[in-house]
Amino acid sequence: MISTEKINTEKRNPNTTHIDSLPTLDMVSLMHRESKRAFDAVDEILPAVAQAVDRIADGFSRGGHLYYVGAGTSGRLGVLDASECPPTFGVDDDLVVGIIAGGDKALRKSSEGAEDSFELGYEEIASRKLTDADVLVGIAASGRTPYVLGAMTAAKQAGATVCSISSTPGSQVDQLADIRMSPDTGPEVVTGSTRLKSGTAQKLILNMLSTCAMIKTGRVYENLMICVRPSNDKLKARCANITAEILGITADKAFELLSLHDFNIREVIDEYKK
């Protein structure tokens, strides 16, 4: 049996010992107060996040990719962030890749046992032939997930930049990483339930990594999504509003222009400003 007594996320939270006996409002208020600790913890590791963003953006400029690897909640959050990049920033589906132990079926149905194989994580990444333009982010709340460690090891051997996100500073994933992003979120409200504070901190970091890297590589104008992929009526309307804002025209006129350019905002702006 592995020892978990030194892992932050497995410790018992003294602030929530009697949460099961609280009135509902007090219960949710206590959870909310504890959740704020995730934001405070992320404050402490922002320099490392900035360093990772710069490395990712540089990699993108050289044809590289961003890989997220995790298991359970960590893996699902990585896949979520990766899957939002194509529609938001108009990038290819394989620019940001989310990999979860157990494969796509693990997104909906628990497959936590898959995380115990170092070899499977190693093979998954070794087969992808990473280069020094690629960045791999290993996500593991406990900092010791074998699948993630295997993936990080393969990436490091390939010469890629390896980053860690955990809630256990100094853990095994941190020791393996070139850039360490491990906010100390402390024990969870419900002992060991890392979808809570730890998951919140992970989501905050992932938001910054992908969004800021996309901003730095020209996929955002001011604070507007100029590369959004308009796959439905709502997004077409968003494209029209963004174009209208940039060009100082009506949304109807913007929609008309976009219709002539397959809803490519950048093309419309370039054409209109000639």
Image (tube, helix red, strand yellow):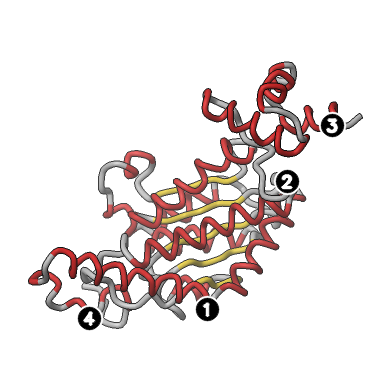
Q: Residue beneath label 3, please?
A: 270
The reply, left or right, for residue 256 in relation to residue 110 is right
CB atoms at circles 1 and 2 under 8 Å apart? no
Which element is circle 3 on?
A: helix
Looking at the image, is mark 1 or mark 3 earlier in the sequence? 1
Q: Earlier in the sequence, mark 1 or mark 2?
A: 1
Q: Is residue 39 left or right of residue 102?
A: right
The label number, if any, that marks residue 44 in the structure image: 1
Residue 116: horizontal and vertical position, in percent? 32, 59
Reading the image, the residue beneath label 2 is: 221
Q: Which residue is mark 4?
A: 15
**Real-space Cα separation, disc 1 to disc 3, in angstroms:** 41 Å
35 vs 203, nearest the viewer: 35
Q: Is residue 254 above or below residue 47?
A: above
- Disc 1 element: loop
Mark 2 or mark 4, earlier in chain: 4
